[in-house]
């Protein structure tokens, strides 16, 4: 059975997945099938600009549904699977871990198993061209001390949250399907992303919206936890690069060399919002809204990514620095109030109440 140019994306209605689909169609242009269950984090409106685009097909469905995954593969004969679908928020994995095991572990297993069956029946050219790209996170490596070297592809796994543990398990499954069955797997481990379409439960969009609305800005603990930030379109370009030229069976770390303490991220957002949407006369600057609240249990202190393998082997570089990417992001949230309203459903408001109302102020 031959393949064609189509790729199957999972979780393409989420934050990174929708940016990936949009940039893929601009940069590469071959057809995309998007399999997404539309959990609270999935929003088909992110891709409404593709409504009349014949290259794009949306399928609402669960990656745990083996029959559905198998039939999509047999029907559309994609040359690659790019697997984003996941439960992705650490705080939710602390309050309700079960969904993380189901989607991130069981769901990845179902995809790998169906991919293996499909791939093994391809003709020789199809088998050697096929790729399964598993999208993962730097959180599988655990937490760094202030002077530790950044995570490399050989850093030992030490996941600390249920989210990180479920992603680590899925990475191990992806690795095993390559090692045992020869499935052409690629794995990417990326640092924290930010940019358009990010669901406002994560740090950067939550702080932009609260700052705009004059609400408290809840910084966990002392605000000195460090994350290594990457603009989402740079993550997408890195995935395209690895998919195109990555060595089968290899892992590539992706990051933008932009380590920032959370408090610095939040104050930068405050200043950008003050500049782009000045507060009402007499209202205090947004920095005054910063409130230190009870820490996240098990909160990893520092993440940092060494992406030198990806730049050395495949020539990838990010296009944005943190300041330019953050400016674009704040502008996007200012210009898209209808999107913001559409995602702030009753379930979202309930999550915000649950996560923040019982956190004591420090
Ligand atoms: P997200 O939560 O915004 O989106 C996840 C998407 O997966 C949603 O559209 C959701 O509907 C879909 N989904 C969830 N369960 C599903 C299921 N059972 N079947 C089918 N679809 C399902 O997540 P994101 O931030 O876009 O992250 C995408 C991927 O990138 C994840 O695998 C995540 O671990 C990884 N990642 C994220 C970051 C980050 O900073 N956000 C960094 C590195 C890696
Ligand atoms: P988050 O966006 O949830 O990503 P992750 O936990 O995957 O790194 O959080 C980024 C950092 O911001 C993390 O150190 C936790 C912190 N944080 C806050 O201080 N306040 C908040 O309200 C949130 C959501 C996160």
Image: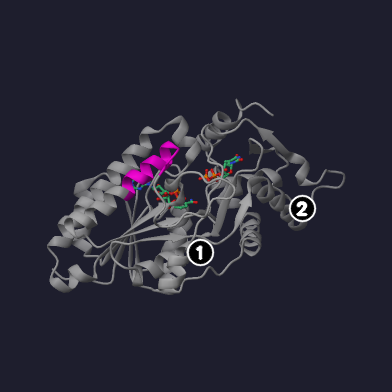
The CA span between labels 2 and 1 is 25 Å
Q: Residue 277: horizontal and vertical position, in percent?
A: 75, 54
Q: Nearer the viewer, mark 2 or mark 1?
A: 1
260 lies above or below 311: above
Which quadrant of the structure image shows residue 299?
Answer: top right
Question: What span is colored magenta in the figure?
Answer: 158-171
The residue at which mark 1 appears reads as 233
Task: Indicate yes or no whether the magenta region holds residue 31.
Answer: no
Q: Residue at x 47, y 66 (%)?
A: 308
Q: Of the residues under marks 2 and 1, which one precedes in the sequence? A: 1
The residue at which mark 2 appears reads as 274
In the rendered image, is residue 123 in sight?
yes
Which quadrant of the structure image shows residue 102?
Answer: top left
Q: Residue at x 62, y 30 (%)?
A: 294
Q: Residue at x 41, y 36 (%)?
A: 162
Q: Residue 362: horizontal and vertical position, in percent?
A: 69, 29
In the rendered image, is residue 50 in sight?
no
Q: Is residue 157 left or right of residue 330?
A: left
């Amino acid at each position: 059975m031959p393949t064609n140019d189509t790729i199957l994306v999972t979780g393409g209605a989420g934050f990174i997945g929708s940016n990936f689909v949009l940039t893929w169609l601009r940069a590469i242009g071959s057809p995309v099938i998007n399999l997404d269950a539309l959990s609270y984090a999935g929003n088909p409106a992110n891709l409404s600009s593709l409504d009349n685009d014949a290259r794009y097909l949306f399928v609402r469905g669960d990656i745990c549904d083996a029959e559905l995954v198998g039939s999509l593969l047999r029907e559309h004969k994609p040359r690659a699977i790019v697997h984003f679908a996941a439960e992705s928020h650490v705080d939710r994995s602390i309050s309700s871990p079960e969904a993380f095991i189901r989607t991130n572990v069981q769901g990845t297993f179902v995809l790998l198993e169906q991919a293996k069956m499909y791939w093994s029946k391809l003709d020789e050219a199809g088998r050697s061209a096929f790729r399964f790209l598993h999208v993962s996170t730097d959180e599988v490596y655990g937490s760094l001390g202030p002077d530790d070297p950044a995570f490399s592809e050989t850093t030992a796994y030490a996941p600390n949250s249920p989210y990180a543990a479920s992603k680590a398990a899925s990475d191990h499954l992806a690795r095993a399907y390559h090692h045992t069955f020869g499935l052409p797997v690629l794995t990417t481990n990326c640092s924290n992303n930010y940019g358009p379409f990010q669901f406002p439960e994560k740090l950067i969009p939550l702080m932009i919206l609260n700052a705009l609305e004059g609400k408290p800005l809840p910084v966990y603990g002392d605000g000195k936890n460090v994350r290594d930030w990457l603009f989402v379109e740079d993550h997408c370009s890195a995935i395209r690069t690895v998919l195109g030229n990555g060595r089968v069976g290899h892992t590539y770390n992706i990051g933008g060399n932009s380590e920032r303490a959370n408090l610095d991220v939040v104050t930068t957002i405050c200043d950008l919002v003050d500049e782009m949407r000045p507060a009402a006369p007499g209202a205090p600057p947004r920095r005054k809204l910063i409130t230190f609240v009870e820490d996240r249990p098990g909160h990893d202190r520092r993440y940092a990514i060494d992406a030198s393998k990806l730049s050395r082997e495949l020539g990838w570089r990010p296009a944005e620095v943190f300041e330019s990417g953050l400016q674009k992001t704040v502008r996007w949230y200012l210009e898209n109030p209808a999107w913001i309203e559409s995602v702030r459903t009753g379930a979202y408001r309930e999550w915000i109440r649950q996560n923040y109302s019982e956190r004591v102020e420090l």
